Image (cartoon, rainbow, N blue to C red):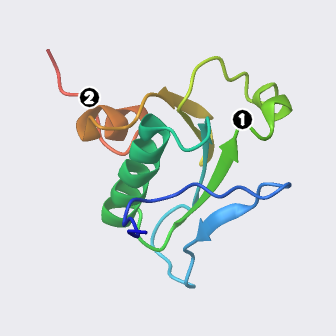
Amino acid sequence: MKKSNKPTIDTPANPQPLKRNGGGQTGGEFWELRLYVAGQTPRSLTALANLKRLCESHLAGRYSIEIVDLVKHPQLAVGDQIVAIPTLVRKLPEPLRKIVGDLRDTERALVGLQLRAAKPN
């Protein structure tokens, strides 16, 4: 059986942060992110891979990611009012922000997370 290098989503019974990348560094706010997915779908896996890439390049050392698989824990969608998946929720820094989609459009994701200002029309 051939082993795949694709990311996988593994969520425990009680979702916990996937990665806490604090490392004691200073120089910026800590970001708490939650990604809602539906199992191992290609779109969910793409969203996770894109989120990890975005965080490493723009938030290195200042973020945690919690993955919530709504196939396993559908009741958890209520708290953040999730109506579509995948959805990324920025819990911290406030205010809470949501981005729906697989985060393929890096510019849109950065603007949505308020990591970059929107370009004027």
Q: Quadrant of residue 112?
A: top left
The residue lying toward the viewer, choosing from 108 and 26, is 108
Residue at 76% over, 28% down = 77
Looking at the picture, does residue 76 appear above or below residue 59? above
Badge 2 crowding class, 10 Å Cα cut-off, few under 14, some 14 to 19, many 20 or more, is few
| Image coordinates for residue 119, horizontal then vertical, percent | 18, 27
How far, Cα to Cα, is label 1 from label 2? 31 Å
Tell me if residue 113 can be seen.
Answer: no
Q: Are marks 1 and 2 in contact (CB under 8 Å)?
A: no
Q: Secondary structure at mark 1?
A: loop
- Mark earlier in primary sequence (1, 2): 1
Numbered label tally? 2
Image quadrant containing the C terminus: top left
Image quadrant containing the N terminus: bottom left
Looking at the picture, does residue 29 appear above or below residue 33? below
Q: Which mark is residue 118?
A: 2
| Image coordinates for residue 22, horizontal then vertical, percent | 57, 76
Query: Which residue sits furthest bottom?
Result: 24
Q: Quadrant of residue 105?
A: top left
Residue at 42% over, 51% down = 51
Residue at 39% over, 59% down = 6
Left or right of 70 in this view: 46: left
Q: Secondary structure at mark 2?
A: loop
Badge 1 crowding class, 10 Å Cα cut-off, few under 14, some 14 to 19, many 20 or more, is some
Looking at the picture, does residue 63 appear above or below residue 101? below
| Image coordinates for residue 118, horizontal then vertical, percent | 26, 28
Residue at 36% over, 49% down = 50
The residue lying toward the viewer, choosing from 84 and 13, is 13
Tell me if residue 24 can be seen.
Answer: yes
Q: From the image, tell me which residue sits under label 1.
A: 70
Q: Give amino acid for label 1.
A: Leu
Q: Quadrant of residue 102?
A: top left
